Amino acid sequence: MTTSAQALMTSHDRLLGLQHRKTAIILGVISLFFLGIPLGVLAFVNARKAEAHGVKATAGKVLGVIGFVTGAIVLGIFVFAR
């Protein structure tokens, strides 16, 4: 592979990583208010995909975990409050 092809592949990977990071943050924020468990998991998965492409996605991970935990707590309150 030539260096220009490597550079193109690297920039393509970075663009994919940036898209996954943006998706992770959006899903993480939504998971704080609505459908916390599934959207929190999706946010975390997208953050991991972004990191696999070499882009830091700490905010997406944190928001996904917080959304998941919050959703689990709310679900637990509804189930055990009866």
Image: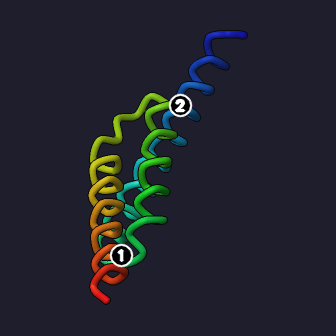
**Residue at screen point 44% across, 44% down:** 18
Q: The C terminus lies in which quarter of the figure?
A: bottom left
Of the pair 57 and 37, the residue shown nearer to us? 37
Of the numbered discs 2 and 1, the one sitting upstream in the chain is 2
Task: Give the labeled residue for mark 1.
Answer: 75
Q: Amino acid at mark 2?
A: Ser
In screen coordinates, is 58 left or right of 27?
A: left
Crowding at dot 2, Cα within 10 Å, few <14 / some 14-19 / many 20+, comes out as few
In screen coordinates, is 73 left or right of 1?
A: left
Task: Give the labeled residue for mark 2.
Answer: 11
Q: The N terminus lies in which quarter of the figure?
A: top right
Q: Secondary structure at mark 2?
A: helix
Q: Quadrant of residue 78?
A: bottom left
Residue 50, percent from left and from top: 46, 39
**Residue at screen point 40% across, 34% down:** 55
Q: Mark 2–mark 1 contact, CB under 8 Å?
A: no
**Residue at screen point 38% across, 63% down:** 26
Residue 31, percent from left and from top: 36, 68
Disc 2 from disc 1: Cα separation: 42 Å
